[in-house]
Each structure stands twice: as C-alpha cells, then as structure tokens.
Amino acid sequence: MAAAQCTSCGAPVEIKNRFSKVLVCSYCGTHLKVTGDGFDAAGKHPKLAEFPSIFQVGSRGTILGKPFTALGRMRYNYPGGHFDEWFLEYDGGTAWLTEDEGTYSLFTEVEEAVEFPDITAVRAGQNVMVGNKKVMVKEKGTAEIAGAEGELSFYVEPGTKVVYMDGVSEGKKIAIEGTENEIELFTGRPLLARDIVKS
Amino acid sequence: MGTDNPDLKALKCSKCGGGLVKSYRSEYDDEEEENVSIPIGKCSSCGQEYDQKTEEYYELFADDLTADKDNSVFRLGIKGTLKGVEYEIIGRIRYQDEDEWEKCTWDEWFAVAADGSYHYFVEEEGEVHSYEDYTPQSIDLESDPSSIEFEGKKISKDDAYVGRIVYAEGELPWKPEIGEPATMYDFKKDGAKFTIEQSEGEVSITRGEKLSYNDVVAAFGGEEHKKLFSETVTRRKNYKLKAALYAVASAVVFALAVVNCLTTTPVAGVMKTKYDLAINVPVSESGQSMYQSEVLYGPFELNRGDALYTARVFVNDSIQKMNLEWQSFRFLLVPEDRLLKAVNHQMTPAALKDLFDEVDAVREPVECYTFSGDFWDEEGTDDEGYWHESDLSVEDDFVLEKAGNYYAYLELTSQKPRATASIGLELKRVKSYRYYIVVMVVLAGLAFWNRAKARTFNAMPFDVAG
C-alpha cells in the first residue's frame, strides 16, 4: 500500500492496511507511528521471542471460510505466561485473533461506547453487566505489553500495564482491556484449530 | 516443576515457623459411624494442626499422594496420534479430592497438538477423557445460592467438589501452587461431559469425551504397555465369554429344575390292599366325644430311592361328603421289612392293631416318614353375610431314602362317624431337582466370578477401566 523506509535503520517498510497506526520494523524492531507525513519513531524494542504460533506476519488463508491476512501482533506477558493478539485483515475489514494457551478466539467487533464495569474490582465467576448484556467473568488479570511486530491498528508502548477481563455471554466471548488512557470491549467467538486454514 | 522444586516445599508452620510433621487426629466419620484416625500435618513446636483444607497439608503429604505418579501410559514428551491428530504431552497436574482422607487423585495431562492447539487428557481410575475449551450459550455461577445454571440446566452446588493440586510437572499454561484449590463441577448434558473448574483467578469450562483405552494405549503406549494391554483385553474377553456361557448353562439347568419340579409320576396300587384295623371307635378326649379309625394300605412299591415324593391325603367326596365337621389324620409310611419284623411276620389285623396302638412307644420306630393334618368344613356369618368354607386336602413332600415295598398307615380321628374309604391317599414321585439346583448355583457362581474377573483382570501395572 504505502512503501517507505524505516526512520531508524532505513530498511524498506510497507503499510498494508489503511487502519494501521503503528508499524514495527522487521529489521531493527523500531516502532514506527503512522502519521500524515510518514512515520515517527516511537522507540526501539527487542524483537519478540519466537514461541510456536499458528501464524506469522503475512500468513494468509481463511478463517471460517473467509479470507484473512495476518498483519501484526501484540504480545502480552502475565504472571502465568503470555498471550498474543493478532491483528488481521479479515473478510474486507479488520479483526483481532487471540492466541492464548493454545486456544483461539476471533474478535470482529470492537466497541468503545459501552458501559463497562470496573474491571479492577471484578472476580472470576462473577456476573457483570456490560452494556445490556450479562457477562460471566471467566478470568481477570493484569498483563504487560511485551512487544509487537508487523502493523497494528493502535499503539501501546511496550511495558504498559493492561488490565484485562475475559467473559462469556450468549455463547460469545467478551474481552475487555484497559490501560490508563483507553478501555475497549471486544466481542468474538472461540475458534477451533480446524476453523483456521492457512494457504 | 515437580515436588522437588524447593519453591513448592516450604514446610514451615505459618503461625510460629516451626517444622511440620505428619500426624493423626481422631475424628468422627458419619459414614463409618465411629471415630477414625485422619492424617494431618502438625507443627512440632506449637502444635498447630493442618488438615486437608490447608495448602500445608498437601505439601507435607505430596510424596504419599504421588508415589504412583509414574503408573500411567502417559509421560512427559511422549507423542501419540488420536483420531488423526498428533499430540505431544508437555505437562501434567495431579489433583487430590479435598474431601477424601485417603488417596483420591486424578491427573490432567496437558498436550499440544500438531496444529498448536492445546488439549487436556484427564486420567482417573483407569479411564481417560479428552477435554477442550467450551464457550456456553449461558452460564451463571452466582445468582442462585444453591445451584449454578449452565445452558438452561441447573446443577446443584452440593455436587461441587474441591480439587487440590498435589503435583505438577512439565510446561503448563499457568504456574500452579501445591495445595492450590479449585472448585469443580462434573456433569453431563446432551450426552456430553462438561467440567467447570473455578479457582480464585479463573473459571474454565471444558467439554470432554471418554476415550477408548485401547486408542490411548495404541497412541501413547510403549511396546510393553501394548503387550500387557492386549493380554488384559484378551483375558477380559475370555472371562466375559465364560461368564456368558456359565450364565446360559445356569439358566438351562434352572429350567430343567423347574420342569422336573413340575413333573410327577404317580405310585401305582397304593390303595389296592386295605386293612381296616379299627372303624369309628368312640373315644373321649378332654370331655369331647369323637371317633377313631385305623387303616393300613399296602404293600406297594416305591421304586426310586434318594428321590423326592409327595404324599397327599384327601377327603373323597364321592364316598362321603364332609358336612360341618372336622377330621384329623396321622400318616405313617412304613417299610415292609420293618413292619414284618415288628409283627414277627404275623400280618393279622389283631397283630397290626396291637402294633399301631403302641406305635409311639416302640423302641425302634417302624415308620420312616410321618405327617399329620386336618380336614374341616365350616359355615357362619360375618359382616359380609353367610360363608361356607372347607379344606379337604393336605399334602407334604418327603425324600425316600431307600427303594422297596412300603405300607401306609392312617390314623383317623373324626367329629362324626366316617367311612374309612372316604379318605383317599396318593403318592407321587417328583423328578429330582435338588441336584439341578446345586449345579445351577455352582454355575451361577462361576458366571458371577468370571463376570467380576472380566471387569477387574488387569495385566497392566496400573488401573485400566473395563
């Protein structure tokens, strides 16, 4: 889409999705914020460790029969381990796919204007109201942004603390993530490995 | 990670820092209905007790609860293919049921599939279930204090049990702590098995299915396990087949016993020869007048020894009806040789009468079998009006020891004078079924034993469910 050069190392970089807000240079790991004029270097961070994953940046195929391209990922560390959130170009739009403990969830709806509970106060097993939906809290915790690669639709500095809550409601998975500056609600569904077909 | 990890073994009293030792406490057991000794941890300094509701207990007793941890077809690093998917076992958590004082553990084996997805194999009492994450349409754990709701199904909270981690090894999706509790619900819905596991920080919902142990051994077992499991399966099948054969044989023998029980052969000529020793002799007993007759029938042949016979004494209405009266009888079966010896071969009515008048006083009984009974005919009125009832037949079974010629003696006592010919006598030989019953019981016992062996035989070094 938009070919350019890394402002830090000069390596060629390219933005593939028009909604992307940040691009991580695959050569030097510099986080490049997308601006009207080009890129602003937001900082240099180590590349992500290569843990086994179903995707890599650029992976293509279908999810539930609809085409996807893996554009980038954000990795979160938490006391029990880590999980990855893949930013996808999916079926003409964008989506997030969470890969956690070998399970996959596809979040296609992102909302910002819903009434949330105070997720710092909820506990596992509790019922909370999110908008007009009753959600059972499956898990709640605090994670830290470990890093990123590829291109992403928002930018969070590595090291930033994120409070998260996973829940279920009406057969759907609900994920709420909050930082000091932003809180977002994702609605999605669980995926089986066979739902994801790489080309 | 395992029990050797020093992080998991801080066996110090949380109250005083003293060392913990294994000990016992006497506690009343509702099921046993008596006091039992239960294991506890105890501080050797301050005496603080740590029972199975505490994490210290599991740290202290971890070795006891994990002594058999290697008795499994699964082990870390092993790969196997189930239903076309290759799995590698990468971790394991062992839980102990908190409510049990004795060892009651199960293992959750954590596996990663070739496609990167994770899976749980739960192994308990020789059964293996495969579990994967499940997102329900609806779930509510807290609205109702007595039950949880899961997709419209109510599950009582009384069905919950608490599992405590007693061992962990390998790669796991979170860092377990020895003694860490999780409240669990196991239930079935629409034929599938579900487990809800609630710990302090997470609720996990999984759906599982039972795996054939044959498939598990084929996928993950070593050569020795495969050989021993094959032997187990073969022997169990053999025991099952034997159990079925013995059960069928037992049923056949039972049917034969029933047929024989219902099949009788009348003894011919019982009433062919008759001696009237006394006819309606008036007697008085306790101020009541009555009549006594004595009759001897025989000889007749009972041609099968060690056999079951039925003797029936009855009123022959065609000779004389009973009309609002009673009559009692005593029947004696007398072997011919004993009778002849008792009367010195003088078979005269007088000699016979003398003998039977004193039959209860002779040193050696002449009879080999006796029974008695009453006939009656009555009428009256009660709340429902007039009634008329009678009982005109009595029968009894006996086992004849020896075949030969016999006599039948009848002592008859009646309220009114009655013809001796009005009392009939029948003897029937019942085909033997006693031995069939014995054989049937033996065969049924063998069937049960083989059935039990078919379930419990195990050549494997650990439990394998049938």
Image (tube, rainbow, N blue to C red):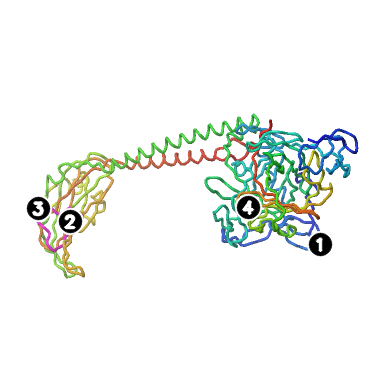
Query: Is A153 or A133 nearer to us in this picture?
Result: A153
The Cα–Cα distance between marks 4 and 1, rounded to whole angstroms, is 47 Å
In front of the other: B84 or B169 = B84
Q: Where is mark 2, residue-wise?
A: B392
- Secondary structure of the residue carrying tag 3 is loop
Question: Which of the two discs, 2 and 1, labels the residue nearer the N terminus?
Answer: 1
Using a 10 Å C-alpha cutoff, classify the residue at mark 3 as few (fewer than 14 neighbours), some (14 to 19) or many (20 or more): few
Tell which subunit mark 3 falls on: B
* Residue at the (59%, 48%) spot, across then down: B194
x and y percent of residue A49 in the render? 81, 38
Mark number, residue A169: 4
Magenta region, residue range: B314-330
Location of mark 3 (residue): B318
Do the residues at pointers 4 and 3 share their chain? no
Where residue B130 appears, x then y in whole percent?
A: 61, 41
Proximity of marks 4 and 1: CB atoms separated by less than 8 Å: no
Disc ID at residue B16: 1
Residue type pointed to by label 1: Cys
User: Which labelled disc corresponds to residue B464?
Assistant: none
Looking at the rendered image, the disc whose residue lies closer to the viewer, 2 or 1, is 1
What residue type is disc 4 on?
Ser
In the image shown, does B443 or B358 lie closer to the viewer? B443
